[in-house]
Structures are given as C-alpha cells and as structure tokens.
Image: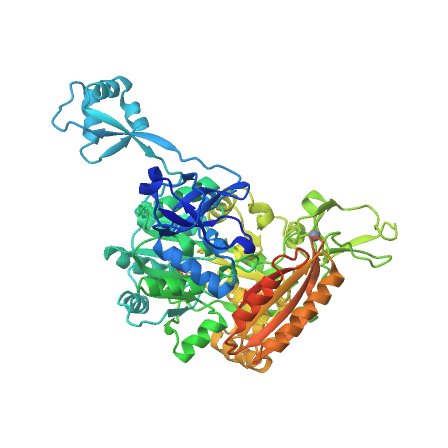
Amino acid sequence: MVVGVLVEISNQNVDRVFDYLVPENFEDSIRLGIRVLVPFGKQTLEGFVLEIKKESSRELKEIYSVVDEDIILNEELLLLGKQIQKDTLSTLISAYQVMLPKALKAKAGTIVNKKMHVFYRLNEKEYIGKTIPQKKILELFQSREEIPREELLKISTSALSTLVDKGILVPIEKEDYRMKYEAGNEEKKELTKAQQDVVDAVVSNSSSLPFLLFGVTGSGKTEVYMHIIEEVLKDGKTAILLVPEISLTPQMVEQFSNRFGNQIAALHSALSDGEKYDEWRRIARGEANIVIGARSAIFAPLKNIGVIIMDEEHSDSYKQGDKDPRYHARDIAIWRAKYHSCPILLGSATPSLESMARAQKGVYHLLTLKERVNGKALPEVSIIDMNLEAKKTPYHLTPILLNEIQECIDRGEQAILFLNRRGFSTFVTCKNCSDTIKCPNCDITLTYHKSNKMLRCHYCGYATPLPKVCPSCGEESLSDLGVGTEKIEEELYKLLPYAKVLRMDVDTTSRKGAHKKMIDAFRNHEYDILLGTQIVAKGLDFSDVTLVGVINADTSLNIPDFRSSENTYSLLSQVAGRSGRSKKSGKVFIQTFNPDHYAISYVKNHDYLGFYHQEMLVRRKLGYPPFYYLCYLKISGKDANYLFQESLKIKRSLDRNLVHTTILGPTSLAVFKVNNIYRYGIILKYKKEENLRDILLKIKNHYKTNLKVKIDIDFSPSHF
Ligand code: ADP
Ligand code: ZN
C-alpha cells in the first residue's frame, strides 16, 4: 500500500502530497484523513494521509507509524480544505491546520494528555446486595449504566471492593472530559408570533437561499436560535451556532447549557488547550451535537448538520485577516450548509452592508424582527455635541452625562459606559518640544497605562516605564493626551465618589474566569456602573441597565477605512441596545465631535435602513463593496527601499495582466512599521476578473524563495 501524505510544515515549497510506502502491519490502520509520522529530508514530520494507492513504480520511503486511532479530517473537511486553498490562495496545509485545535497540530509545543477515569458497570444484574451499602450502590445502577469510581467510594469503600471482587461490578477506563455542562430547569419561553414565523421559515427550510435575520436588539434572536436548534435535534441532526468571541460570554454558554445540557460543546479562547481538545473530540465522536463557538468553530467536525447559525453576522471577528488562510466564516458556513443541504441563518441587528445588499437583491432570503419582545420601544438616544460641551468642563464626562448617571444610580438602576480604548491616555507628549513617545519597533505612539505606570505598544506588546523627563529634550514636561478607560475610571472616582465602578477591558479580564465573575457581580448589583471597551458593547443582557453612555463616538469614525462608518453605526447601535432591555425603559447618550455625521445621526432614530441606503450611495460613488470586490496585497519585509522597488514591480506586473481591475498603490500602511517590519499595500478593485487568482498565485510563487519579501493576499479584507 502507498499513501500520499501532506506534511505539516507551512512552506509553500513543499505544500503538496508526497508518496510513502506503508509497511504491512500498518495497513489496517490507514484511512484517509488520518495522521502518520514520516521521514522528510533529515526531519521526522507528521502529515495527513490524503491519498491511498495500490502501488508505486518508484522506490519509496516507509512511514514510521500511524499517529491517530480516529480520523482527524473527515471526507467533508478534506474537500473543504481544498476549496479554501483555491479561494484564498493559502497553502493546503494551513487550510487543514486552521480546522484543528492546537493540541492536534504538529509542533504544538505542548503535549495535551487525555484524562482517564475509572467507571464501573453492572455485570450481573440478578445479584441482590448483602449489606445496606451494597444495596445502595446497586440501586444506582437501576437508572444509570456507568458510574464514576469516586461516587461509589463515597458510599462505601469496602462494599465497592466486595462487589468488584465477586465480579458483580466491572471497572472500565474512560476518558474524562474536562468540560461538563449541566442542564438547568430554565423554562422554555413561549415565542411571539414574529419569532415563531422566523423559526418556521428556517426549520421548514422554505428557501434554498441563506436566511438573513434582521432583528433589532432585544427582539429575542437568541431565543429564536434555541428553538430552531431544538427542532433540528428532534430530527436527529446537529447544529452550529457561531457568535463573535466577544459575545461568547459565560452568560451565553450558561444559557445554552441550561437548555441543552451536555449536548453542547463550546469552543472559545477562554478554554485551555486541553479543554479545547476535549471539546473537539466530543464533537468528532458525536457525543456533542450542538457546537457554540467563535470563528474557527465553523470547522467543527460535526456530522449530519441540520442548521448553521451565525449571530452578529456583521462582526469582523468572523474574518481571519492576520494570517493564512484568510477566510471568512460566512463563506465556510455557506459551503458547509450546501454540503449538508441544511439551512443557514445569518442574524444581526445591523447586518453587514454586503448581506443586506444581497437580501435586497434576493440572493439571501430576508426575515425581520421589528420589535423588542417586551413590546418596549428601543431606548431614546440623545447626541451630546462635544464642540459645545467640551469647553464647559476639564473632564471627558460632560455634565449632561454625569447628571444622567447620577439620576440613574439614585433610582437604583445601573449604567454602562462605553469607550473604545483601553489604557489611561492614548499618547504622551512633551509640552516643551512637542515630541510624542513612540514604540521603537513600530510606527505608533505608546499608550500610557496608569495602574502600573507603564507605556505600552498595542501593536507589538513592547512596554517601558513612563520616563520622568522627555527622552528628546530632557525637560520634565511630559503630559498625557487622549483618553482611555483607566482615565474615565479615575474621573468617575473624582466626580461621583459614591458610585461603584467596574472597569472591564482586556487588561482586567485576562485572567481565567475573571470575565464571568465581573458579569455576575454586576448583575448582583455589586456595582452601579460598568465601564469598558467593546467587551461591554455586545450581547450582554442586564435587566436593570437603563442608561448607556458613549464617551467618544469618534474613535471608530476616525479610522481611515472604507468600513469606518458602517462599523461606527453598528457599534453604537449594539451598545445602545444594552439599555432598557427589560421592564424599565432605557436611555442612551452619545458624546461626539461629529454630531451631524450620518453614521451617528441615524443611530438616534434606530434607522438601520436609512443608514444602509445612505452608505450604499457612498460606496457606489467610491467604488467599494458591495459594488466592487476588493483584494488586498500586503508586501512586507525588513528593507524598506528594496521592498518599495519590489512593490512597484508587482504593481507593474498586475497592470500588464489585469484588464478589468483598478489597481491602487503601492502605499505604505497606516502604521508603516510593526515589529521592525515595513509594510506596503496594493488594493485591487474589480467586479469580474477571470484570471485574478492565477495571476496572483504566479506572483506569490515568484517570491516564495525570496526571504526578503513576504506577500499576503486577502480577498475581501475586513479592513486595511
Ligand atoms: P437579541 O439577541 O435579539 O438582542 P435576546 O434573545 O437576548 O435578544 O432577548 C432579549 C430578552 O428577551 C432576553 O432577556 C430574553 O430572555 C427575552 N425573551 C426572548 N424571547 C422571549 C419570549 N418569547 N418571551 C419572553 N421573553 C423573551
Ligand atoms: Zn510596537
């Protein structure tokens, strides 16, 4: 037997199948999608079996061993990997690796053990216990097949050993999964008519097109998802629910685990490698049939999928843009839904422009939830014009907003304050020479973190203590400008000393379990104000929050990106949606220097469609998606001059070969240098360009042995 093996090194030069001979004693274990250990040059590598053949005419090396008992990449995933390679121009091996938990990747660095556990099984059913402890133990087996050793030991050590000695009970060793979900007695909610209509449409798969669920915040989308999944399970099928990492809160997992118990598997970044590995195997073995997870959970090895749901479908966290394969989970979801002939549901209160445009054109099937479940109006939104208000106060919290916070707390209710920037201030400048302190490795200012008096680079992680004097002129005249969450926290302490403030951002939630503790504490009213970055903007459902304040709506608006308006509108709507979700009505206050910008003014009336139409005009005029496709080439390396010359060559070659494409650049990226690597970008805009992938692949291949130039290709980039 001969196998074609794809080895696990991400090198474009060896990204193909190599043939190996299989010694006879391994032949029975060989299946497609299993991993084997092979000699490769001077190395020993793991690789996937992608082909099985009878014979080869050439002299071949033998495989060393078979790594797995179970198939790692099933037939569907093997096919999907090839599609990803074709669509994104990534290597095939990277397409397969992205599907697997870290513990299953070669060179994972850590060896993740399976945890083993002893269980007992009843061997002789007729036996009646002789003592009370024996009877107690045997009683347990009336309703259960296998019982963990610890549980029986608690009843009686000696009774257990007697039963085992007599052969009444037999031990079996089983894997003990690290994650356990217990069903609670959470009552199922009766759906509203509007919700039921959505469930019916999806479950009956009334359209072969993807469904787009456009439902305002608080319209009960999560409840709809749960009902759909329940129906799908009744049919003996499985389900994937994707949520952005940031909304994959313990709250959300708890809600699903309450309803579905151990049928769920959750995949997210808060899990350890071992926990992820366990979850993955529970899924692969069919022991879990609902997968809830962030982007890469779309690759969960479920069989017989009955529905794929993508919540907050507009979220850019669904796009992997920082490394190959640069895929969008939505595309993968659509591919898998086709493979399983199952419905796919994309849900959002603020659908991406692309998705809404497709729905308007009839490429997606539009479903709508116009109202909140509780019948309450969406919160009243007020815009605070900082051009007028900023002058009246030395603080970032305006008197209007402060007054609202105070009244909210006095009523015994809670407030969420949102600022899209962590740290204390954005940068430190010298009042004497007006120099700002920059990162030595990157082209970006350092951010001041007051709690530990450190300056930090948010790009490369570089950190240094805040110097006493200006590094440029030596004067003692450094001052911090801009504003981060830490600074607002300090203002709140000063201005509302009795208010209990909980700050939540990556700096305060990095420890395991911290996130859940904070959310629980806030829900229990241990705090009055939840202050945070994006983490507080999405998915949270607190019934006593009646005030939402946005400290500075301009941070996301000022990013030089064609999506900045869309992102601002959707972010503000999401944050606003945290207010007044239960019985009490909510208010929202947005501080901004751009009160007339349409991305902000449409939020005031919760007018998504108004925003959508206006933004579509802008996109059409500028030739951006969804009217044109984009492809982004990033060219990076250490030698800036050489890099620019090569970038020009690439541009000329594209000019010669592409007919229907607009080529922009090369231009240096907004942050030109990161970690001492310089970056140029070329943007391609096109509607239809038949040979685009072939031409780009040629360019990529041309540079594959050139260590001074790295080329990254991103189709439909979420940002530049
Ligand atoms: P969305 O995801 O659309 O923002 P959620 O699914 O979080 O909305 O629902 C908002 C609130 O309404 C939640 O507290 C949820 O439990 C509640 N809810 C949803 N559907 C119903 C229903 N049919 N009856 C009563 N309450 C519901
Ligand atoms: Zn840096």
For the image, the number of numbered tags is 0
Residue 384, image x, y percentages: 62, 69
Residue 659, image x, y percentages: 57, 80
Frontmost residue, 52 versus 70 = 52
Frontmost residue, 32 versus 504 = 32
Residue at 28% x, 58% y is: 232
Residue 220, image x, y percentages: 37, 62
Position of 261 with respect to 502 (left or right) is left
Position of 614 with respect to 653 (left or right) is left
Q: Is residue 448 visible?
A: yes
Residue 648, image x, y percentages: 70, 70
Quadrant into which the C terminus falls: bottom right
* 367 vs 584: above or below: below
Q: Is residue 558 visible?
A: no
* 398 vs 474: above or below: below
View extreme (left): residue: 126
Quarter of the rendered image showing ligand 1: bottom left
Structure colour scheme: rainbow
* 337 vs 627: above or below: above
Position of 383 with respect to 452 (left or right) is left
Frontmost residue, 224 versus 89 = 89
Residue at 53% x, 68% y is: 716
Residue at 43% x, 46% y is: 20
* 153 vs 267: above or below: above
Position of 586 with respect to 383 (left or right) is left
Frontmost residue, 230 versus 391 = 230
